[in-house]
Amino acid sequence: MPLQDHLPPLSREFVSHFGEMGSRWGINRTVGQIYALIFISQRALNADEIAEALEFSRSNVSMGLKELQSWRLVRLKHLPGDRREYFEAPGDVWEIFRVLAEERRRREIEPTLSMLRMAMLQQPVNDADRHAQERMRQMHDLIDRLMTWFDDVQKLAPETAMQLMGMGATVTRVLEFKDRMTGKGASQTKKTES
């Protein structure tokens, strides 16, 4: 029985939405839909099943699977007695988030940090260059700090990270209170207002 006969409306909606969002995340629609189908599937799927369920050509599915493998978002699986390759998504959504964040960092953030580091090593030749270099330094410092924080979060157990995320507003209030007590909050507010 074709897989599409087993794809309920809610699953179809999810797969369709993921395809639409894919282009906003830097992947094409086909790859987004393939990933969504694999993610919600109760079992590993082979390329023929994916092509049939999504009504894509086999070659489009193969290219999409290669891209998903390069992002480490799907795993190859072999079933005993079956020569076909099957694909599954990691079961833990936290692991998926980690892999996706690591890949985006490697592909997008690290090259930006590298360019900023190189720019800061250059000798400015005029005031415009000094101003630009200072702005780049500020950007580098912010990204670098965020990446250090992210590395710390990555080391946390998933349960601890989820608790930390759930404390967002509480942590913000505590930090604002600390700033008011030390006088830092008022001076920062005055700086941003002027």
Image (cartoon, rainbow, N blue to C red):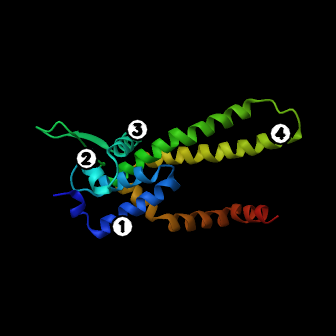
Q: Are marks 4 and 2 in contact (CB under 8 Å)?
A: no
For residue 48, the mark is 2
**From the viewer's perspective, is residue 144 above or below residue 193?**
above
Mark 1, secondary structure of its residue: helix
Residue shown at 86%/41% (left/top)? 128
Q: What type is the residue that disc 1 sits on?
A: Glu
Q: Earlier in the sequence, mark 2 or mark 1?
A: 1
Q: Position of residue 171 (x, y in %)?
A: 52, 63
From the image, tell me which residue sits under label 4: 130
Give the mark nearer the N terminus: 1 vs 3: 1
Residue labelled with disc 1: 13
Query: Which badge, 1 or 4, comes first in the chain's sequence?
Result: 1
Specify the quadrant that holds the C terminus.
Answer: bottom right
Furthest-right residue in this view = 126
- Of the 4 image quadrants, the one containing the N terminus is bottom left
Using the image, tell me which numbered label, if any, was put on residue 70.
3
Circle 3 SS class: helix
Categorize mark 3 by other alpha carbons within 10 Å: few (<14), some (14-19), many (20+). few
Q: Distance from label 4 to label 3 (Cα)? A: 40 Å
Mark 2: amino acid: Asp
Marks 1 and 3 sit apart, C-alpha to C-alpha, by 26 Å
